[in-house]
Image (cartoon, rainbow, N blue to C red):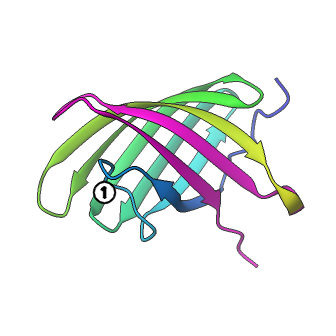
Amino acid sequence: MKNLNLLNNKVFMSLANTANGDVNGATRFYYTQKGKVITAKYEGGVVQIGSIIGQMLSDDHFEICYQHLTVTGELRTGQCKTKIELLENDVIKLVENWQWLNGDLSTGYSELIEVVLN
C-alpha cells in the first residue's frame, strides 16, 4: 500500500449526508494515520464529541467504527466503508457508506471533503 499516511493530520468537513445521519456542515473531523491504522476525533453541529478507529483495506478504501455523543446526550455508534478520492490540487474526498449499530440500524451515505488550511 502506498497511501500509508495519506490521512495523517488531515481535517475534513461534511459535503453531503443522508437525512438519518447526525453529521452536518458544522462537524469537523481530525484524522491521524500511522501505517494502516486510522483514528479520528470529530465534533460540531449535533455531535458534542466523537471518535473513530479503523484500518486501511487498500490504497483507496478503509473501514471504520465510530461513536459519538450528541448535544442532547444520545450515544450513537456505527460502522462505515470509505472510498478515498483525490480531486484537483490533491484535495481528498471521502465517500462513505455507513450503518448505525444502535437505534434504528439504518444505513446511509455521506461525503467528506478535506479542509485545506492555508
Q: Is 48 placed above or below 67 here?
A: below
Give x and y (percent) for residue 8: 68, 48
Q: Is 59 placed above or below 6 here?
A: above
Task: Give the left or right position of residue 101, taking residue 85 as reference.
Answer: left
Q: Quadrant of residue 79?
A: top left
Give x and y (percent) for residue 103: 15, 35
Give x and y (percent) for residue 60: 74, 31
Q: Is residue 20 magenta?
A: no
Task: Give the left or right position of residue 1, taking residue 78 as reference.
Answer: right
Q: For the view shown, which residue lies furthest in the front direction?
A: 19
Q: Nearer the viewer, residue 70 or 10?
A: 70
User: Residue at left 70%, top 39%?
Assistant: 84
Q: How many marks?
A: 1
Q: Quadrant of residue 89?
A: bottom right
User: Residue at left 67%, top 28%?
Assistant: 61
Task: Give the left or right position of residue 66, taking residue 92 as reference.
Answer: left
SS for callout 1: strand
User: Residue at left 49%, top 47%?
Assistant: 110
Which quadrant would the N terminus be assigned to in this image? top right
Please name the amino acid that badge 1 sits on: Ile
Q: Is residue 117 magenta?
A: yes
Q: Which residue is mark 1?
A: 49
Q: Is 11 placed above or below 66 here?
A: below
Task: Give the left or right position of residue 1, taking residue 69 as reference.
Answer: right
Which quadrant would the C terminus be assigned to in this image? bottom right
Give x and y (percent) for residue 33: 64, 40
Q: Nearer the viewer, residue 93 or 9?
A: 93
Q: Is 59 placed above or below 9 here?
A: above
Highlighted range, magenta: 89-118
